[in-house]
Amino acid sequence: MRQAANLWQVKVELWRVLVMESGQQEDPIQVIDTVPLPVCTYTRSVRDRCFKTLADYGHCAAKKLDYYGFKLGLRVSSTGMITHFPLLNARAHDVNHTNALVEGFNGLCPADKGFLDPFRQPLLFDRYGMRIITPARSNMKGEHPRPLRKFCSRIRKIVETVGSHLTERFAVTRIRVHDLWHFQHRLIRKVLSHTVMVFLNLQLKRDPLDLDGLVSA
């Protein structure tokens, strides 16, 4: 297992090559979100010795989940390929991770209400030409045209599908190791596996996120 873990750099490079070769890194529309990554059960967190100075307590409003661990940041292309996946602090609100998630990107970025920030969004647009589109709260006047908001609402579902793949099919929320190095290695392996499947679907002109169909084809 240690020899396999030592290949993490190779796996990261392979992931980068696939993203670049597929052209998805340059996709002008990329969606951002986060996924909770518990490192142990909530009740055992007080006895944690493996991630004590690294992990933190977080809350996922979408899943109504209190947990101890990290957040997985996701930025995915409009076809569903993961183009960026930073490991983030669990306690901080999603909006505080915006800069980490949009690093190196300057296109259209649909996101959920967790990234709503009327101060940061104009700054990112002015500085980088990157536009984050989030749903407006009920007490806010919509700043973007309705067709654009409806389009972004539909495309946001792509990152939710990718998050479900990683959670349900690749078990990213059930990584049980004793140090951050092995945790990151297993996370990279799961992201690479997902990327390979999306890449193959694109090459075969299939629905990029139809992972079941690819296996049975």
Image (cartoon, rainbow, N blue to C red):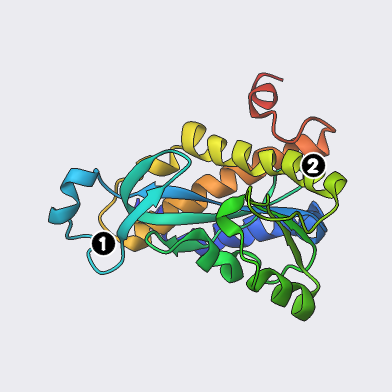
**Which residue is disc 2 drawn over?**
150
Q: Position of residue 208 (x, y in %)?
A: 74, 36
Q: Which residue is mark 1?
A: 51
Please state the horizontal and vertical placement of residue 151, each as a whole percent of the image: 81, 43
Q: Label 2 crowding class (10 Å Cα cut-off): few <14, some 14-19, many 20+?
A: few
Marks 2 and 1: in contact by CB < 8 Å? Answer: no
Res 199 visible: no
Q: Secondary structure at mark 2?
A: helix
> How many numbered tags mark residues here?
2
Residue extending farthest to the left is 47
Nearest to viewer (mark 1 / mark 2): 2
Q: Give the residue type that dot 1 points to.
A: Phe
N-terminal-most mark, 1 or 2: 1
As drawn, is 29 to the left or to the right of 88? right
Label 1's element? Answer: loop
Outermost residue on the front side: it is 139
Q: Can you say which quadrant of the picture contains the C terminus?
A: top right
On screen, 100 above or below 179?
below
Left or right? Give the position of 62 relative to 113: left
Q: What residue lies at 43% left-to-right and 48% top-to-bottom?
A: 36
